[in-house]
Image: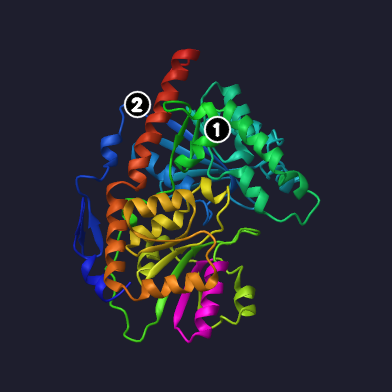
Amino acid sequence: MGGVAAHCVAGTLEGFSVIGHGVSRGAHAVDHRALRSTQTMRVGIVIQNEYPHVGLVRPRRLARSLTRAGHHVVILASGPRDAAPYEVLEEVAVHRFTYLRRSRLHNWAATASPINLLWSLWITRIAKREKLDVLVSSNIRVAVPTIVAARWLRVPTVLDLEENNREAVKLYPRTRLAHYVVRNSRLVGWLERLAARLSDHVWVVVEERLKTFGPQARLGSKVSVLSNTPTLDEVYRKPARPAEPDRPFTLAYIGLFAPGVRSVELILDALCYLAKQGERVRLRIAGGRQIEPLVEQLGLRDAVTFSGFIPPEKLSEWLQEADVGIVAYDVNEFSNTTVSNKLFHYMAAGIPVLTTDMVPTRRIVEEVGCGRVIPLGSSASDVARLLLQLRDIPEIRVEMGARGQRAVVTKYNWESEFVGALTTMKQLQEDWTIRNGVPS
C-alpha cells in the first residue's frame, strides 16, 4: 500500500500509537504480566509434524503466550531420526519422537496416527518426566494417542481442531490406495466426533464451526472458539513506503497451496481477462509455488510474482507493498466453517481485503468494513471489474485498511483470544485436581 495509505494509516489507531518502526500498547492491549498466576501450569502441546515448521503458527503462538504468562510449556513433535531428541528453542522446549530410531520402522513409528499407540507410550513418558498438568492435541491425528496418554496420567486434554477435517478431506485428491482410508470423509468425521467426545475441551477456529457439534456446542459447554488471529506485535511493524508512480495495481496472497483446494484460481482467471483488456494488475504470492505451472499455462508469467517464504518479522512490510490482500477460496462447507490466517495478516498490515463469499470471512469483512466480497457465482469478468473498481478508489482503500488494522488492535488479536484459552486450561486443571484428588 503506498502514497495515500502511507500517510493516512500512519496516525494513531484506537488503543495503539504507531511510533517509528513499532507499536506502543494502549488500553485495549493485553499485558501478559497481568495473566501471570501464582500457580504455574505445566502444559504439553502434541503436534503431528516436525517442529519448528513454517506452517505451525498456532502451536507456536500458544506456546509463546503460555511461556510469557509464566507457565512451563513443551512441544511434543515428530521428527527425522537424525534430529535432536530434545532442543530448547526461543520460549519453548521441544521433545521429538525417539522410539525405534535405529530401526527401519522408525519412519512408520514416528508418523502420528490414531492407531499408533507407540505415541501414547512416548507421550506418557515425556509427560511424566516434565510433570505435565494439561495436554493439548493439535488436530485429530494425534488426538487419540494424546487422550489415551492423558487417561493413564489422569490429566485433562484439550483438542485443538484447527480445521474442519471431515470437509477438508473431501477436497483432497485420492492418488494412492491408502487415501481411500485416510481421506474417507465419513471415517475422518467419525474420528473427529470421537476425539471431541473424549476430550475435556475442544477449541475451534470460528463460531460457524460450533453448529457442527450440535448440543455439545451450547454456550458454556466444552466447545469454544480460539481463532486464528495475529499477535499485536504483527500490527504495522514498519511504516508503509510511498508507491512508485509507475507501479501497477498490486494484489497480495500469502500461504501454501493444498492439493484439491482452489485458492487463487478465480483471481488468475480475472487477471487473464484484464490482460486481454490491456489493464496492468499484478499478483504477488508469498509462500508456496505449487501453482507456478498453472501460471505458466495461463500465460501470466509477467503478471504473477512468486516471492517465496517471507519471515514473519518482514511479512507486514511485504504486504504493505500491495494494494489489496486476496482470500479467494472456493465457497463450500469447508471454507464456510473456518477462517484463514491470511485475512487477519492483511488486516494487521493495514491493507484492504478482497474475499470470496465464505460465511465467516464475509461476516468479519462486513462487520469491520475492511474490504469487498466477491458475490457467489461471479465470473472472471465480474471479478476483473471489481478489481478495477478497487483500483480506482485509493482513498476508500486506505479507509478500509485502517478499519481492518483498528479491528485487530481492539478485537481480532491473539492476546485477547489467549485470555479465554488460558482460563479454560486453568479451570480444567483445577477441576481434575478436585475430581481425581491429584495434588497440584
- Residue in view at x 54 percent, y 54 percent: 53
Q: Is residue 340 left or right of residue 233?
A: right
Q: Which of marks 2 and 1 is in front?
A: 1
Where residue 231 sits in the image (x, y, percent)? 35, 51
Badge 1: how crowded within 10 Å, few (<14), some, or many (20+)? few
Q: Quadrant of the C terminus?
A: top left
Callout 2 amino acid: Gln
Badge 2: how crowded within 10 Å, few (<14), some, or many (20+)? few
Could you tell me how many numbered marks the image carries? Answer: 2
- Residue in view at x 45 percent, y 73 percent: 385
Q: Is residue 35 above or below residue 391?
A: above
The residue nearer to you, when weighing 19 against 390, is: 390
Q: Residue furthest right?
A: 177
The residue carrying mark 2 is 39
Whether residue 20 is visible to the viewer of this picture, yes or no, is yes
Callout 1 amino acid: Phe
The residue nearer to you, when weighing 25 against 271, is: 271
The residue carrying mark 1 is 213
Q: Which of marks 2 and 1 is nearer the N terminus?
A: 2
Q: In which quarter of the image is the N terminus?
A: bottom left
Q: In this view, does 402 lie to the left or right of 297?
A: left
Q: Give the range drawn in magenta.
A: 265-287
- Residue in view at x 60 percent, y 33 percent: 123
- Residue in view at x 42 percent, y 57 percent: 343
